[in-house]
Image: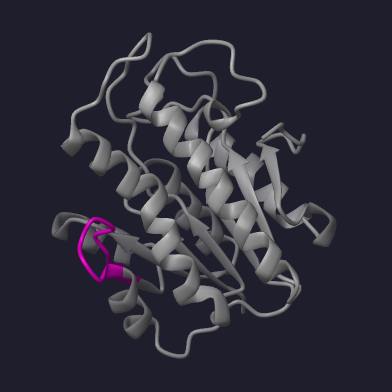
Amino acid sequence: MSTCLIIGASRGIGRELARQYAADGWRVIGTYRGGADAAPLAALCARALAADVLAEGWAAALGRELGDEVLDLVIINAGIAGPITSQPEAPGRDTFDAVMHTNVLASMQLIPVIADRLPAAGKLAVVSSRMGSIGTASDASWWLYRASKAALNSVLKSASITLGARGVVCMALHPGWVQTDMGGPDAQLRVPDAVSSLRRVIAAANRSHNGRFLNYNGEQLEW
């Protein structure tokens, strides 16, 4: 049985990833932040683990909880939007720290912890956003969020160089405009449909996809 670790699995895309992978026979380990999310996630997953990505030492603590687990797939889904802006506006220090710590630092702290638990042919995916593409940027909305996802893409690309040498396939994924708390009810994609598409992309990925930025329909996106 294959094992999948999902960081940020208590709601939205993360929760649906956990549900679909578990329904498909995977052994799912999902993380949650708040205590109220523990029981619902435990009903879906083989293991539900507390992990607050803003807490000092959270990644090392999660590593101890994981023990000797071999992780065939790791999906880092935790993320926040921050202020919704239409043009460049200076964020406050606390706001900047919350967004960058959640969207960037968390992955930088976790990847070294789980690296040796990923076998050859294992896969690592970060849920990024097309808004993180510098090459295709055409407006200045969501300024801080865009910066955080561009930074996350850089983190993933760097990780793909070292992990890819061991046969691990690393990818950044754009889930589309999805009907989540962040995307809103008018978004293009329902959560189950977006997740099904992401799972197809992950399943089809091979060593030629290592270090790539992929859309939910499988097309390669520009960094």
Left or right, 77 with respect to 122, comes to: left
Kindly indicate the quadrant of the structure image that contains residue 11: top left
Q: Name the side, left or right, on which 83 lies relative to 79.
A: left
Q: Position of residue 170 (x, y in %)?
A: 66, 59
Front position in the image: 19 or 188: 188
**Can residue 8 be seen in this snapshot?**
no
Asked if 202 appears above or below 114 in the picture, the reply is: above
Which range of residues does the magenta coloring cover?
Answer: 48-58
**Location of residue 57 in the rendering, given as x and y in whole percent from the top left corner:** 25, 71
Residue 149 shown left or right of residue 170 in the figure: left
Position in image of residue 131 (x %, y %): 53, 26
Q: Quadrant for residue 174, please give it.
A: top right
State which quadrant residue 142 falls in: top left
Looking at the image, how many numbered discs can be counted on the residues? 0
- Viewer-nearest residue: 62 or 144: 144
Q: How is the image coloured?
A: one colour
Q: Locate residue 119, reporting x and y percent.
A: 66, 80
Residue for point 37% across, 57% down: 106
